[in-house]
Image (cartoon, rainbow, N blue to C red):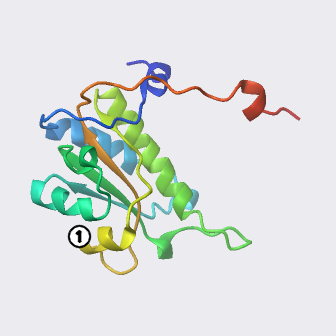
C-alpha cells in the first residue's frame, strides 16, 4: 500500500474479527515502533504485547469497552520517565516520543491490513497492576490490534486554512 493511501485509510477501529494475528505481521508492526525516532535517540519506551485471552479480559477493569479487550491482541505503549530527554525549560519529551512510536505502530498496522484504536481514557493504576509493570514504567497509550470487522467512515477534517499557517 502506498504511504499516502495508508495515512488516508487509517481509522479508529472498534470492531474486530475473531482471527489470529500472525507473528510475522506482529513483528513488522512492532519493529516499526522500535525504530521510531525519539528526542536524543533516548527510546524511552517499552511495548507490552498482550495475546493471552485471560490477561486481555482482565484489562476490561482498566477500559471496559468489549471491542477493546476482545480484540486478538492488545498493545500497551509505556514510557520510562527517567530515560526521557528534557528540554532546557524542563519539559519532558516522554509523551511525544511514545506518541511518535505509537503512530509508527498504528500506521504499519494499517499497511498490514489490521486495525487499531488509540486509547488514552484508561485507568493507568489498573493497567500497571494487571500488566505487572515495574516502578518507573508508565502506561501511556493502549490499542487493540486485529483484523477489522468493518471500517468506520472517514471523519471530517478541519479545513487547510484552520490548521496550516505560513509566516
Q: Between residues 104 and 55, which one lies in front from this camera angle?
A: 55
Position of 163 compared to 130: left or right?
A: right
* x and y, in percent, of residue 32 in the image: 37, 42
Can you identify the residue that label 1 sits on? 130
Does 1 sit above or below residue 60?
above
Q: Between residues 30 and 55, which one lies in front from this camera angle?
A: 55
The extreme right residue here reads 167
Q: Between residues 94 and 42, which one lies in front from this camera angle?
A: 94
Position of 132 compared to 45: left or right?
A: left
Q: Between residues 36 and 52, which one lies in front from this camera angle?
A: 52
* x and y, in percent, of residue 85 in the image: 58, 67
Is residue 162 at all visible to an observer of this figure?
yes
The extreme bottom residue here reads 135
Task: Give the residue displayed 28% in from the left and 26% down from the top.
Answer: 113
Position of 16 compared to 31: left or right?
A: left
Task: Give the residue displayed 28% in from the left and 39% down from the top.
Answer: 28
Does 31 sit above or below residue 131?
above
The quarter of the rendered structure image containing the C terminus is top right
Task: Give the residue displayed 37% in from the left and 19% down from the top.
Answer: 1
Task: Name the image quarter holding residue 12.
Answer: top left
Classed neighbour count for the residue bearing mark 1: other residues with Cα under 10 Å, few (<14), some (14–19), many (≥20): some
Does 73 sit above or below residue 94?
above
Task: Give the residue displayed 56% in from the left and 56% down from the top.
Answer: 96
* x and y, in percent, of residue 114 in the image: 28, 32
Amino acid at each position: 500500500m502506498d504511504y499516502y493511501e495508508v495515512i488516508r485509510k487509517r481509522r479508529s477501529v472498534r470492531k474486530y474479527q475473531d482471527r489470529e494475528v500472525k507473528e510475522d505481521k506482529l513483528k513488522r508492526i512492532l519493529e516499526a515502533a522500535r525504530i521510531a525516532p525519539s528526542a536524543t535517540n533516548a527510546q524511552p519506551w517499552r511495548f507490552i504485547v498482550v495475546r493471552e485471552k485471560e490477561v486481555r479480559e482482565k484489562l476490561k477493569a482498566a477500559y471496559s469497552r468489549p471491542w477493546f479487550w476482545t480484540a486478538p491482541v492488545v498493545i500497551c505503549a509505556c514510557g520510562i520517565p527517567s530515560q526521557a530527554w528534557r528540554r532546557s525549560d524542563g519539559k519532558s519529551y516522554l509523551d511525544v516520543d511514545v506518541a511518535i512510536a505509537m503512530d509508527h505502530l498504528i500506521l504499519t498496522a494499517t499497511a498490514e491490513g489490521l486495525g487499531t484504536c488509540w486509547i488514552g481514557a484508561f485507568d493507568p493504576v489498573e493497567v500497571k497492576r494487571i500488566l505487572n509493570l515495574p516502578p518507573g514504567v508508565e502506561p501511556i497509550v493502549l490499542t487493540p490490534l486485529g483484523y477489522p470487522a468493518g471500517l468506520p467512515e472517514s471523519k471530517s477534517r478541519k479545513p487547510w486554512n484552520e490548521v496550516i499557517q505560513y509566516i
